[in-house]
Amino acid sequence: MARLLRVALSGLPLWRGYSSQGTQGMLSEGFVEALKAVVGSPHVSTAAVVREQHGRDESMHRCQPPDAVVWPQSAEQVSRLAALCYGQGVPIIPFGTGTGLEGGVCATQGGVCINLTRMDRILELNPEDFSVVVEPGVTRKALNKQLRDSGLWFPVDPGADASLCGMAATGASGTNAVRYGTMRDNVLNLEVVLPDGRLLHTAGQGRHFRKSAAGYNLTGLFVGSEGTLGLITAATLRLHPAPEATVAATCAFPSVQAAVDCTVQILQAAVPVARIEFLDDVMMDACNRHSQLHCPVAPTLFLEFHGSEQALAEQVQRAEEIAQHNGAAHFSWASEAEQRSRLWAARHNAWYAALALRPGCKGYSTDVCVPISRLPEILVQTKEELKASGLTGTIVGHVGDGNFHCILLVNPEDSEELHRVKAFAEDLGRRALALHGTCTGEHGIGLGKRQLLQEEVGVVGVETMRQLKAALDPQGLMNPGKVL
């Protein structure tokens, strides 16, 4: 194999670079042959349609596609691909399921897209230790399907059926975060191929302990790094016992203020709610249409409780009392699994329900998160400003942890409307920062929030991140143009 690589790399220059206008570079034939020597010819593509598919995600961000797409089948192959690219100054872009919302997979400088979805094995299950090791092609639904008979589950659930290592890379979250935490709370160890091809186990090879005081938190460094520091080739995840009993509910409120006040009061009363999601009237109408629900078109909370039968009865009673105190109506409980699945499927499909409000348009999602005490203030103000803006949009969010989204619908060919949407999103991000919140609760920085990141963490914070990036990726080839 080493001889084949030497032959493939001989002759033509490997990387033809870019013009002064920033147009896309081209890989030499010799370099493409070198990629094929690592993974096999069927696992490399330079076809335009394949490259275009890998140059975008669910966001509105558009840019050049990669110059080639490669599908490795092992960490060893990923390591060799990284070393090959890095040795020749070729950018590397990791790719999972392509469900991100911040342009994280866009190939801003061309290069090689490494699609990790064919590495889809569950490598190790430790039920007694509540942990599992998965490759990057394993999605959250696939993992939970395999865990179905074990009495365990993995609760972090973004709307899309995203890959678990991709979720680690973006610091993803979901509807269960209020009780079970985000990816940052549920990743125990990562296997990472560094930009130069070296293999790193962030907590030590094979380790899956719950806590440690050993040195720097390398696992935490890579969770949320968005592919800018290395390629995650395996993740050790924390599992949780499947709840003995589950009950869900929907309740409509007379106003946004009432719904959010109810949320804060439920949390302050220490009711151990597992999920508490907010949908405004526009979002509720969209979900009714898209998912054939029959809920009132009003500001609505979706709630879910996990525990024993006795504990659930107490939780449900307390939550209902608080909701009624805030004027809730149409309180509807769903205890059957089929009813609950239908309800949460509608919530997880909210993005597509919103897109259906303006067929042919694209979605632009905000992602702010604030301290719980400031949530009523920012949500009410955001709803008023959304109405006044003339934009078409919905509000939906994981209000149990202070995180919510405006899904704004925009014609990408209308530059004036696109400008207004971006201005609205930036203003909302700055409003969250002014309330001591963050510009992104779970989607990441990607392409569009780099300025807001500097405003959030300050010049020294960004400079420290740049120093870390330079130490691990001195050529700046790992997913360039993202985060920093």
Image: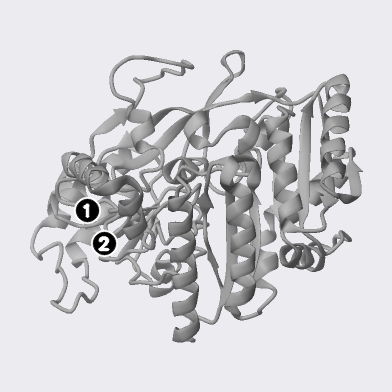
The Cα atoms of the two marked residues, 1 and 2, are separated by 9 Å
Mark 1 lies on residue: 477
Left or right, residue 400 beside residue 307: left
Answer with mark 1 or mark 2, whichever residue precedes in sequence.
2
Say which mark, if any, is on residue 111.
2
- For mark 1, does the 10 Å Cα neighbourhood hold few (<14), some (14 to 19), or many (20 or more) residues? many
Which image quarter is the N terminus in? top left
Q: Callout 1: helix, strand or loop? A: loop
Q: Residue at x 87, y 43 (%)?
A: 324
Q: Is residue 35 visible?
A: yes
- Is mark 1 in CB contact (under 8 Å) with mark 2? yes
Q: Residue at x 72, y 23 (%)?
A: 151
Front tag of 1 and 2: 1
In the image shown, does 266 or 343 lie closer to the viewer? 266
Q: Please, what secondary structure does the residue beneath circle 2 have?
A: loop
Q: Is residue 109 left or right of residue 162?
A: left
Vertical arrangement, residue 88 with respect to residue 28, above or below: above
* Three-letter amino acid code at the position of disc 2: Gly
Count of numbered circles in the view: 2
User: What is the three-letter code of the residue carrying label 1?
Assistant: Leu
Corner quadrant of residue 47: bottom left
Where is residue 360? Give x, y as percent: 61, 81
Q: Compared with residue 131, is residue 375 higher up or lower down, i.e. above or below?
A: below
Left or right of residue 278: residue 340: right
Spot occupied by residue 292 in the image (x, y as percentages of width and height): 85, 63
